[in-house]
Amino acid sequence: MIEKLACRLGRNDETPNIELAELLCQSEDTGGIRGIVEGRKGKDKAIASDCIKVLYEIGERKPHLISAYADDFLSLLFSRNNRLVWGGMTALAAIAETAPDVIYKKIDRVLSAFDAGSAITVDNGITVLSKLCKTNKAYESHLFPVLLEHLRKCRPSEIARHAERMAVCVNQDNVKEFIDVLDARKDYLAKPQSERIRKLENKLSKQK
């Protein structure tokens, strides 16, 4: 399977990696997926980058096929290679509802990467935390306040995007607090951001 990666084909685009992910999903080739996981662990950065791309593309389509590798993705959050950090967080975002307990056991690692990460790491970190909240009330009690605090402090240009990602874990019990945080930041929003928040709040208000 490694031979089908973009870098091994002399390609600079992601199409071969996406095609490989689709092939592995269609065949549910667990051995091939394991080979991609092992390829990611090698010293070749190009191969590692292509492998993590294949893995999170699989996760977006059939998360159960990569759920067993949650610990592998968690280990990437400490990588010195930023591509692998945000790739690992993207993979975790894909499997957060199928492997929540494994991820939550190492939630400090996720929170550390979330606090210090790049924009892509933060975006996907929000998805990880939000999906964990959705799966377990105890996780929600711990992590929803973290999400709200982030929403209070993030840049105005990020508010709508991040709120939309958090919306998956908003429910009848926490919707008022969530909307109150958004309302408190409305004066800082540009018109397009305000419109996105308005639409989101209208949708969520039905849960009150």
Image (tube, helix red, strand yellow):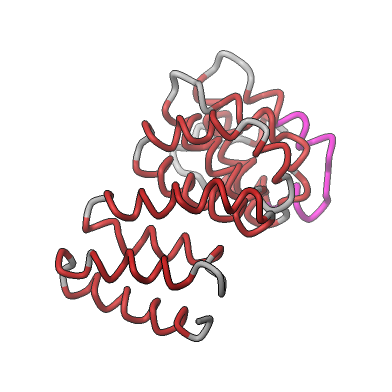
Q: Residue furthest top?
A: 43
Instruction: Relative to 150, say whether 178 is above or below.
Output: below
* Magenta run includes residue 27: yes
Question: In x, y percent, where is residue 207?
Answer: 53, 81
Q: Position of residue 135 (x, y in %)?
A: 68, 56
User: What's drawn in magenta, residue-wise?
Assistant: 22-36
Viewer-nearest residue: 120 or 125: 125
Image height check: is 187 above or below 68? below
Q: Is residue 178 magenta?
A: no
Along the viewing direction, whichever of 42 and 145 lies nearer the viewer: 145
Q: Nearer the viewer, residue 151 or 59?
A: 151
Q: Is residue 20 left or right of residue 206?
A: right
Q: Quadrant of the N terminus?
A: top right
Q: Quadrant of residue 160?
A: bottom left
Q: Position of residue 2 (x, y in %)?
A: 68, 29
Q: Quadrant of residue 37?
A: top right
Please determine whether, in this image, residue 178 is positioned above or below residue 97: below
**What residue lies at 44% left-to-right and 47% top-to-bottom?**
146
Q: Is residue 195 left or right of residue 9?
A: left
